[in-house]
Image (tube, rainbow, N blue to C red):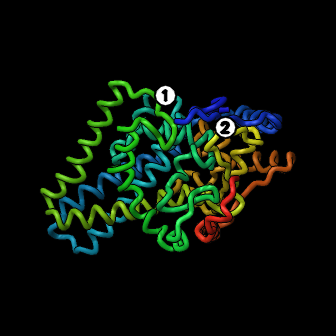
Amino acid sequence: MVYLCAQIEIDHMSKVTFRKNNTQFYSTLKSRVDAYFKNNNLDKTGNWSLYIKSLILIPLAFGLFFSVLYFHETLPVYASLTMCGILGLVFASIGFNVMHDACHGSYSKKQWLNDLMGYSLNIMGGNAFIWKQKHNIIHHTYTNVDGIDDDIAKSPVIRQCHTQTWAPAHRWQHIYVFVVYAISSIAWVFVMDFQKYLSRHIYRTKMGDVDKKEQVIFWTSKLYYLLVFILLPIWVVGFKAWIIGFAVMHVTMGLSLALTFQLAHVVEGAHFEEAYDDKNIENDWAIHQVMTTANFAPKNLLVRWYVGGLNYQIEHHLFPKISHVHYPALSEIVKEVCKEYGIVYNEFQTTRSAIVSHLKMMKEFGNTPPQVQTAA
């Protein structure tokens, strides 16, 4: 099981483990997936479809950024703002397709290329080292486990499961959640990365050692972002034009990133656990991944292309070191094995239906008064 640790240490020394009660499910699934790659003579990493996509998205991002700066005096305001919005969407797509596969080690068989493409996150303002700790290790092992999974640890701003503390404002969270998502990427770049780096914690879990190399990379890349995305544009177009364009870019980027990942885990049918004390989760790791995850829009080729196959989150959580280009084919295998073992495969046929389901869950979590809060 990729990334799976036997237990994780949290601040107050609670231990979280998975019960090994049905390991045959994953062994059967893994053997069939391995057979698929062997029989079709395929590598599990990315292929030319991913590399061509990279050659489209990365130059497009550079082109949009420098065009807005170079032509700012001749472009109409609406055109400049439209380009800033598109730039945010392109950055998000680079994150979905290039950075995500690279940081999971599935972009290429060459580790140096995975490392290089993973640093695309640093170029866009984040930090690959922190993201790998938060996402690869914690989120992929303890998905939807309240008390550990940082992806659902946004309380008190929003409440994402029944075991989190309720506040009256949460009654309206299904409405204001879009504002939260819109500012999520700017909060990531300027607040959450620094919070994690300085505290050496990701939510309640201690980070791995941050060596001298990673410390230099962290501060150098943050300085780079300050110079290239803030000071340079202010010098070229002025503060007012920069702040508006910068905000538009982050709004589209934040909405795209947040919605894509929320549709995978905070929807109807997704299971939640709580681990503020010692916890032995009743299912094994693989079954837990299926129960806490959902797919959406599997037949929509545009969505699949844009989000880098992350609409196939069940397959991704079961096989995070396999490139997303293979998930559509693997989904048929996963569905078959889930059916054999009586495990529910949660899938929404459209993006719209997944968004509606997400908002229903946010409304449900927001309407729960404190006296009926229960542990999962």
Query: For residue 344, which quarter of the picture?
Result: bottom right
- Classify the position of the N terminus by image quarter: top right
Q: Position of residue 144 (x, y in %)?
A: 62, 49
Q: Residue at x 41, y 51 (%)?
A: 56
* Residue identifier under label 2: 278
Rendered view: 357 above or below 162:
below
- Label 1 sits on a secondary structure element that is loop
The answer to whether residue 129 is left or right of residue 39 is left
Query: For residue 370, which quarter of the picture?
Result: bottom right
Task: Give the distance between the C-alpha atoms of the residues marked 1 and 2, in whole angstroms.
Answer: 39 Å
Q: Position of residue 266 (x, y in %)?
A: 61, 59
Tell me if mark 2 has few (under 14), some (14-19) or many (20+) residues whose alpha carbon lies within 10 angstroms of its own: some
Question: Is 144 in front, or is 13?
Answer: 13
Question: Is 54 in front, or is 260?
Answer: 260
* Residue identifier under label 1: 110
Amino acid, disc 1: Lys
- Tell me if residue 174 can be seen: yes
Amino acid, disc 2: Asp
Q: Residue furthest top?
A: 212
Q: Position of residue 285 (x, y in %)?
A: 71, 39
- Tell me if residue 51 can be seen: no
Query: For residue 248, which quarter of the picture?
Result: bottom left
Along the polypeptide, which appears first: circle 1 or circle 2? 1
Q: Position of residue 170 (x, y in %)?
A: 53, 68
Q: Residue at x 24, y 55 (%)?
A: 66
- Label 2 sits on a secondary structure element that is loop
The answer to whether residue 119 is left or right of residue 37 is left
